[in-house]
Image: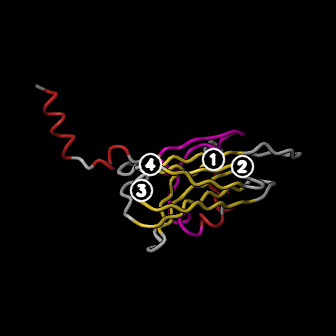
Amino acid sequence: MRFPILIGLSMLLPVSSLAAELTVSVEVPRLNVAEYHRPYVALWLEHADTGEITSLSVWYDLNLRNREGEKWLKDMRQWWRRDGRSLTFPVDSVSSATRPVGHHTLTFVPGESPLNALPDGDYRLLVEAAREVGGREVLTLPFTWPVSAAHTVEAQGEHELGAVSLTVAP
């Protein structure tokens, strides 16, 4: 008897909210430098029409004494000016530790934190990295929401970021 009830409930939910997702792959490149520190990285969405900002993930050193790691978040200047300075850290479902060299994949589902509702429109995914004794780099990946078929947008960093891709699936 449970089976017909589940089928009935699933028909009430919009299809896009069940399967839709944004998958972001970020490469932290190996750098041949004398003093290497893992980069701080911020990922956020910017709505083209409204300018509304949604921070998706911020990687920084959470374990420094006296919240010293938060002091360096300002080095991700573009993100800091648009959203970071208005936040209180750590932010649930957004803040996480810095990542080592390699490929890192994050998946975001509309209707769930930190993405929450994603209104229709044109967006830009921005990925910014800044590193102590290093440089700063920002990559932009445009996309339109919702989508009727899965597609991938890619960008290639030159210094602090490697390959970055965004796969948007309906």
In what element is the residue under mark 2? loop
Q: Which residue is labeled 1 in the image? A: 26
The quarter of the displayed image where residue 52 is located: bottom left
Q: Earlier in the sequence, mark 1 or mark 2?
A: 1
Residue 8 in the figure: left or right of residue 41: left
- The residue pinned by badge 4 equals 169
Q: Quadrant of residue 121?
A: bottom left
Mark sitting on residue 147: 3
| Residue sitting nearer the eye, 13 or 90 | 13
Q: Nearer the viewer, mark 4 or mark 1?
A: 4
Q: Of 19 and 55, which appears nearest the observer?
A: 19
Q: Considering only order in the chain, which callout, 1 or 3, is on the residue closer to the N terminus? A: 1
* 3 and 4 marks in contact (CB < 8 Å): yes
Kindly report the distance in space between the C-alpha atoms of the residues bearing marks 3 and 4.
7 Å
Circles 4 and 1 in contact, beta carbons < 8 Å: no
The magenta region covers 81-107
